[in-house]
Image (cartoon, grey):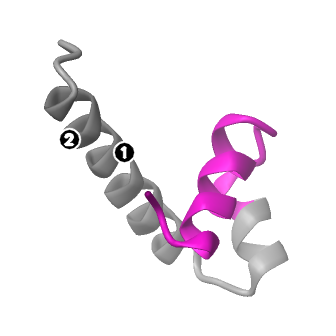
Amino acid sequence: SLPHPDKDIFIRRYYLFESVKEIAQNLNLTPKSVENKLYRGKEKLKAALIENGIII
């Protein structure tokens, strides 16, 4: 599971469809930091899916 701030970023991007720039401004982060957190979140999700036998 993702830490709360990272989960919030993931939800804002892929569920609420906020831009990286909007997320960065709203959470007082740099766009690069948001992009890095999204990348790490996707990698964790991918690993969890593979671990549970879901082929991606």
Asked if 34 appears above or below 39 in the picture, the reply is below
Q: Residues within 10 Å of mark 1 (few under 14, many from 20)?
A: few
Which residue is depicted at the point 47% across and 62% down?
Answer: 2
Which comes sooner in the sequence, label 1 or label 2?
A: 1
Q: Is residue 12 left or right of residue 7?
A: right
The amino acid type, in three-letter code, at marker 2 is Ala
Q: Which residues are magenta?
A: 1-21
Looking at the image, residue 18 lies above or below residue 1: above
Q: Quadrant of the N terminus?
A: bottom left
Position of residue 9 measured from the top left corner of the image (x, y, whole percent): 64, 60
41 with respect to 12 (left or right) = left
Assign the magenta stretch its main secondary structure.
helix
Marks 1 and 2: which is nearer the front? 2
Residue drawn 17% across the image and 28% down it = 50
Image quadrant assignment for residue 26 = bottom right
Rounded to the nearest angstrom, the CA distance separating label 1 from label 2 is 9 Å
Give the residue number, with chain letter if any, for mark 2. 47
Mark number displayed over residue 15? none
Q: Which image quarter holds the C terminus?
A: top left
Front one among 13 and 49: 49
Question: Which element is circle 1 on?
Answer: helix
Task: Kindly identify which residue carries mark 1.
Answer: 42
Q: Residue at x 27, y 29 (%)?
A: 49
Number of numbered discs overlaid on the protein picture = 2
Closer to the camera in the image, 10 or 34: 10
